Every structure is written in C-alpha cells, then in structure tokens.
Amino acid sequence: MATPVSVHAHAAPQGFIRKYIFSLDHKVIGIQYFFLALTAVFVGMFLSLLMRIHMIWPTAVLPIVGEIKPEQYLSLLTMHGTIMVFFVLTTAPQGGFGNYVLPIQIGAPDMAFPVLNMLSFWTTFVGFIVIIAAFFVTGGAPLHGWTGYPPLSAVQSAGPGEGLGADLWITSIAIFCIASLMGALNFITTTLDLRAKGMSLMRMPLTVWSWFITAILGLLAFGVLLSAGILLLLDRNMGTSFYVPLINVNGVMMGHKGGSPLLWQHLFWFFGHPEVYIAILPGMGVTSQVLSTFSRKPIFGYKAMVYAMLAIGFFGFMVWGHHMFMSGMSPYSAFAFSILTMCIGVPSAIKTFNWLGTMWKGHIRFDTPMLYAIGFVSLFVSGGLSGPFLAQPVLDIQLHDTYFVVGHFHLIMGVAAIFGIFAATYYWFPKMFGRMMNETWGRIHFFITLAGTYAIFMPMHYLGMAGQTRRYSQFTEVAYQTKLIPLQTFMTYAAIITIAAQFIFVINLFWSMFKGPKASDNPWEATTLEWTTTTPPPHDNFGGVTPVVHHGPYEYGVPGAPRDYVMQNDPATYAAH
Amino acid sequence: MHDVTHDDSKGQYFWVWGALLILTGAEVWLGYHSSLMMAVHMLELLLILSIIKSALIIGYFMHLKFETALMRWLLVISVTACFIIMYFFFFPDADRILKLGVK
Amino acid sequence: MADATLEHAAVGHGAPGAYEAPLFGAYSKKVGMWLFLASDSLTFGALLFAFSYNRIYTDWPTPFHVASITNATIMTACLLSSSLTMVLGVFAAQRGDRAWTRNWLLATMAFGTAFIVLHGMEWTKLIGEGLALPGFPRPAGAATGELAEVSKNTPQFAATFFGLTAMHMLHVTIGVIYLGVVALRKLFLPILGAIWLAGFLLIPSDNVFHYGIHVLLIGLVLATVILFLKPKDYDAHDVEVSGLYWHFVDLVWMFIFPLVYLMSTRIS
C-alpha cells in the first residue's frame, strides 16, 4: 500500500496571491469568509434601511436610489432575506469562525481538504457576485421573497424582476448549495479525523460540537435545496411544470399544466428549517464558550448541552411543515408537525437553563464578548417564546404572514445569530488579528444594538396581532392598518439609529486591526487549544508540534490548580473534578 | 480493516455482479407481467428489488460492509431517516391533492 | 486494526499517533467522498420524491415500447458491468499494478461512455417521436404521434423523465471525466477536448445534445484547473475514492430504471 500523502503538508506559501488570495490556509480562508459576510451584511442592512424608509415615506426621493416603487420594495425584501440568510447567517459563523477556529480548537494543522476549502470559499464568492448582479440586469432583482414560492418564481412573465433577475437568484442559490456542501463535508471530515491525541468527542469545546452538527445539517439539507432549485430552473427555462398548475398571467394562459406549488414548499422547507439551525447553532456554541469563560465556571451540564444540540439538529429535519400550515397541506401532517415543533422547545429550554446555570454564582467579567453572549441568551428567549404560538396551526392561521412572524424569526434567527457573530468577533479578534478591540466602544455598540433590536422587533409582535400583514410596501390604503403607522415610524427611527451604531463596530474593527493594543496569547484566560498557541497562530497552527489534550474544555476554578483555569493541554492532573 | 483479508476473494464480486444482472432481469420480467398484481404492489416489489440491488452495490462494490460499524450505521441511518421523514409527509400530501381533485 | 487504521489515515504528518484514531477508521478522502455521496443521494432522493409526488395525483401514461425497455436494460447491464471492472481496477491499484489499474479504469470508462451514447440515442429517438420539453430545440420532422400526445396531455411525464435522466446522465459524464483524470491525467485533456469539439461539430443543431455536449467543455476546464493546480500521481486511495463515486452513479440508476422505465412499459 502506498504511503498516504499527508493532505496538509503544504508549506507556508510565499507571494501575495498564494498567501492572501488563493490561500489554502484555513485561517486566511476564515478571514476571507468573515469579510465576505461583513460586506454582505452591510448590503443587506442597507436594503432593510431602504425598506423601512419606503414604508413610512413611500414617495420620498432618496439620493442615488431615487424613489422606490412598490415592486422594487418586493425586490428589496427578497434580496435582503436571501443575502442575510445565505451570505451572512450561514457564511459568517460557519465559514468564517468555524473555518478559523475549528481546526485550532481540535489541535489540527489545517482542515482535512485545504484545496476544497479554498474552492468552497471562492464558490461562495462567485455566488455572491451572481446574486448582486441580479440588481443590475433588465427588470431588476426578483420579487418572490427569499422563499421563492412558485408560481410567482416559476413564471418568467410574472413580474418585473422575474426574468433574468430570478434566474440569477436561483443560480446563485445553487452555487451556494455546492459551496456549502464542500464546506460541510470538509468540516465533518476534519472533526472526525484530525482531533489531537486526547481530544475525545466529549472533550471537544461546544463550539466544535456546534460547527460539527451544523455541518451535518448543511450536508443533508443543501442537497435537497439544490434539486429543488434545479427543478425551478427547468420550470422557468425549459417549460416543465413541476411547480406550476394551469395558470393565467396578465390574461395570458401559460403553457404549464398539472404541477403543484406545494411540492416546492415541501422541498424548500425541508432545507429551510434546518437552515434556521445552521444559522443559530454556531451562535449557541459561541455563547456557551463565552459564558463559561467569562463566568470563570465550567459550562453547566456539558453533556446535556451536546445532546440538546444533537436533538435540535435531529428535530430540525422533522418540523419543516410548520411553515406551511396555511398552504392547504394535509391537516394530519399539520398535527404531526405541530407536536414535533413543540418538542424542539425542550432541548432549547435545556440550553437556556444551562446557560443561566453557568452564570449562576460565577465571577462574571463583563467584557464585550460576554455582553454579547448574554444578549444572545436574551434574544434567544424573547424570540423563542413566540415559537410555540406559531407552532400551533390554530394560532398560526391568524398570525401567518403578519409582522408577528417577522418579529419572531428576526429575533431568534436573525439578530440572535448576529449577536453570536458579534460575540465571536469580539472574542476571537485578538487571536485573529493579534490586537485587542476597544472595550469602551464595544460596550457602547452593544447597548445601542441591544436596545435598538428590541425597539425594532418587539413592536412587530403587536403589529402582527393587530393584523398588519408582512410584505406590504405601504399601509396608507387600508383603514385599520393606517392606525398602526405611528408604531412603524417608531421602528424606522429605531432602525436608523441601530444601523448607524453598526458603524461604531466597523470603525472599531478596522481601527483595532491596525492600532489596537497588542494582544497576549491568552487575553481572556480561556482554556481551549487556540489560546495555547501564539497570537496570531503560525501557518501550521502549533509550530510543528501537535498538542496533546489532557483536560475537558471548560475547567475553570479547579481546586488545587495554580490558576483559576486549566488549559486543555496542561499535562498535570488536579483534584478530581 | 479488512482490505488485506479480502484482497484475494475477487470471486464474490463476480457473484454479486451476476446477482445484480439476474435481479435486473427479474425486474424487467415483472415490468411485463404487471397484470399479475395491482400497480401498487408491483411498485412495492420493484422497489424492494431495487433496495436489495442497492444494498449489494453499497455493501460489496462500495465496500461499506467492510468499514467500521460506526461509519456503516451513521451514514446509512442518517440518509435513510431523511427519506423516511420525507416519505411520511410528501405522499399523504400528494394523495390529498388527488382526493381534492386539483388539476 | 489500530495499525492498519493509522496507515490508512491521511494524518501521517511525520508523527504517527499524534491524533485520535479516526472515528470512521478510514482515511479522510474516503470519508469525504462518502459524505458527499450521502448528500448527493439526498439530491437524487428529492428528485425522485418530486417525481413520485407528481405521479401520485396524475394519470400516468405507459408509453415505453419494447425497443426502449430493451435499450434501457442494455444500459443497465453496461453500468453494472462497469461497476465490476471498477472493482477490479481498485484491486489492481491496491496490488500496485499500474498497467492493469489503467486498463480496468479504461474499461469502466468504455462501459460508462456506452451508457451515455445509448442513452443519448434513446433521448434523440424519443424527442423525434414527440416526447419533448417545450424548451428543447425542435428537430426537423418532429412527429405528432402517440408520444407527442403524452407530452401534451401529461407534461409531468416528459418533465420527470428528462429531468431525472438528465441529472443522472450528468453524473455519469462527470464520473467518466473523473475516471479519465485518474487513469490518464494530463493525457486525458486533449482526448476530452477532441470529443467535445467533434460532438459539437457533428451533432446537428436541432438536437439537444448540440448544447448538452458543452458539459464536456466545462468538465475540461475544471479538469485542467485541477490537474495544473495540484499535479500528482493518483494512488490506490484516489482510485478507490473515484470508484465509490462510480458505484454510486450505478446505484442511482438502480432506482431510476424501474421507476421511470419499468413502471411505464407499454404492454400490447
């Protein structure tokens, strides 16, 4: 048998292009993903700002973009949703921080397949370019929402953005699927095969567990979206009728016949619901890590946390129908989906209580990462509590497609995941760039963002219960909805302030990257392996040696230990824990 | 790892190949004798034969039978579970469309 | 088992035993390929579910005559035999017998190519008889026979048939290119280029494969990038991993053949 060639024996590359552009180093790729997501989040945020302004001042003529027409509002919400879900919430926590931190945390010199890793980043990048291109083609961006429901999305003549723009949209999603598949199998293989000696499964940091489970979800979910997208492309361009029944658009009978829009909804949400957990699980991992570190206490119920994440991943595949209660789906399925959805509340509650238990009587250090982790728990609870309402078909029929839903998923999947990303950024920034971020501005950023997000998304629950429908570009024409405009105006002002506060973060990020105080190897006095190596880590992460792991990931306050924390690679044993 | 022990047992692969061809022949024969049973049972029978064939391919040609038990079970169970979950929700729905008479 | 595992694990890295034993006891590339196949089987699974979903509530026609079924049976036999030659190729590679590795891989590719060509001819025949998608180029004397009625009355039939088999044909084509790269490396690039050019020039422009052949061009570009980005001698592991992919393509056909063809046989 030929001696297997080590897959990550690549030497440190010379030259700018191989070192920073087409790099095989997981750390560089992680930072590339991070900046891609940062660009995407600003695009997405800008779109949401335009939407909020249009809702309140529909006839306002804005600089550069001009006056927004109602159909352009639909394009804005489609692109806002798609860019945020795919290129921010999926890309940043998994592609960015997962790529950077996972190999170091398990003691590996790189990912299992560095070339594949590079390809998956550049494929994602191409996907991003393609979706941005949809703004600039004839007809503009598509208007079918991020869920792309047919027949609207499947008929070229259905609206102004449904021509080339929608084709680009689907192509971008398909490219993103392929990129995510490559990333996911890389993450799983790395976790299975490249753990340092002693890094047993139950010694992996919860961040590694969360990225691992996220990768499994991605592996199983994105393949289904890929085939759903292929069928949609066929419907649009080859005249097939997978999703389109007999349909009349603007007085013209389309050639389609016999398809079922429900099929798309099933296939899409079979991917779409796991996608929610793809976005939130890494945030849960980071929160666990940060809460334990800054409370100077072991995580409360490590095993329960792992099993809870596995349970969430498992149930995540069985609940997609709760997005479809209004679709005319079989009522028996709706009943099953409702029960299964409420089951997810159990592992979620386990996690919440364990986070609180971790902080209970800890010596809490309120650094910025800790603030964001606490913010994550807060948003997760606030957003999660509206989940059981929507899980019940009877209530969902009232609340479906209202602002209640918008408030729910923005809190739990949107902003909570973003808070996870912020916690991760403030936490790992010293390791990634060798300098500390500014604490004062970090705290100011946190408090404005927390108050801002609640001010934007909490009123949405009231609006939804009052019957305000989502995806309406303006509310001036419907009598009962005009009464709600003052609350919408308040939300718009809150959004403007919150978005402005994000510039504090960006300036802090770039300023600290070059001017911040130098970081030590372990500024947070944390225990996991990334803090045992130098800052920033060398090309092969540990300078030619592979660490040996002797301890669990969260050994804080161990009796008999010289410090209040025990590094994972500390060979000494202390009093039984 | 069984690579070494199975190196010299090429014969079994010819047997598997033969079995696959025979099963294919049986399927084609069934395809022309659908009058023997109801269409649903015919579908079930064909699918069972297909699953046997794919099990032979996965187990022998793709060598999964000789991998570690953990890999074997995790891969097979995760994919099968997804299919079972989809089965229980997709088909009642399609059936409902039939009953509602939507065209 | 531990020693064999370490030998297999692509984690040599100059310090054997620096890592935990791989959880799946296999080297990384094999695990990676298995994971890809798990994902891909869900892609195909979703397509088959879409097919069945449409089929359940549609009055399904049974238009395939003996000629189609015979052709499809021969194609099935080709794929099954290609799997056997692939297994023999993997054995040759594990023995270190380079000549026979290459021969068996070429035999596998020949069976795969036969499958694609037979399938392409079948498509062309069916399209000529009127079973077509609205988006296909219309061949010169397109018939208005029984099959044309089928695609008019039950558009789902043509849609699922072409959708499923096209996706599978794409996978077979990728598989043949993959095996070609493993077997012949850079030598394969001019061959692939020649096949693409010949196909593009010789297939008339009213045939759907006049456009479909461009898959080979995309494959050529990707194969070139990969071969020049990471020039290497493919070892027994690479052969085994490519074999996994090939058997999977075979496996998918084992479901498409009975569902698409045999459940739609015309019994006179």
Image (cartoon, coloured by chain):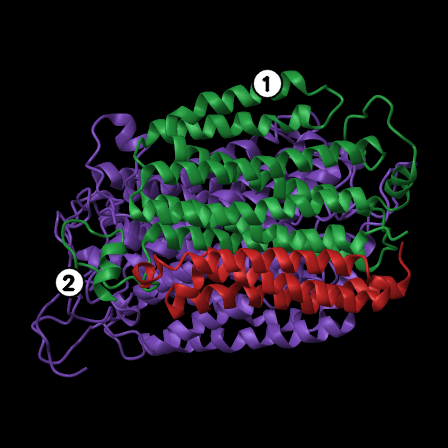
Chain colours: A purple, B red, C green
Which one is in front, C170 or A347? Answer: C170
Q: Determine the secondary structure under disc 2.
A: loop
Tell me the residue that label 2 is attached to. Answer: A548
Which one is in front, B2 or A261? Answer: B2
Which one is in front, A128 or A112? Answer: A112
Residue A337 image point, x, y percent: 66, 71
Alpha-carbon neighbours of circle 2 within 10 Å: few (<14), some, or many (≥20)? many
Residue at left offset 63%, top offset 59%: B22
Q: Are marks 2 and 1 in contact (CB under 8 Å)?
A: no
Amino acid residing under circle 2: Val
Residue A480 image point, x, y percent: 80, 57
Q: Is residue B98 above or below residue C227?
A: below
* Residue C22 appears in the figure: yes
Residue A572 - label: none
Residue A302 image point, x, y percent: 33, 75
Amino acid residing under circle 1: Ala
Q: Is residue A81 above or below residue B86?
A: above
**Which numbered disc, 2 or 1, marks the residue closer to the eye?**
1
Residue at left offset 19%, top offset 36%: A12
Tell me the residue that label 1 is attached to. Answer: C198
Q: Chain of mark 2?
A: A
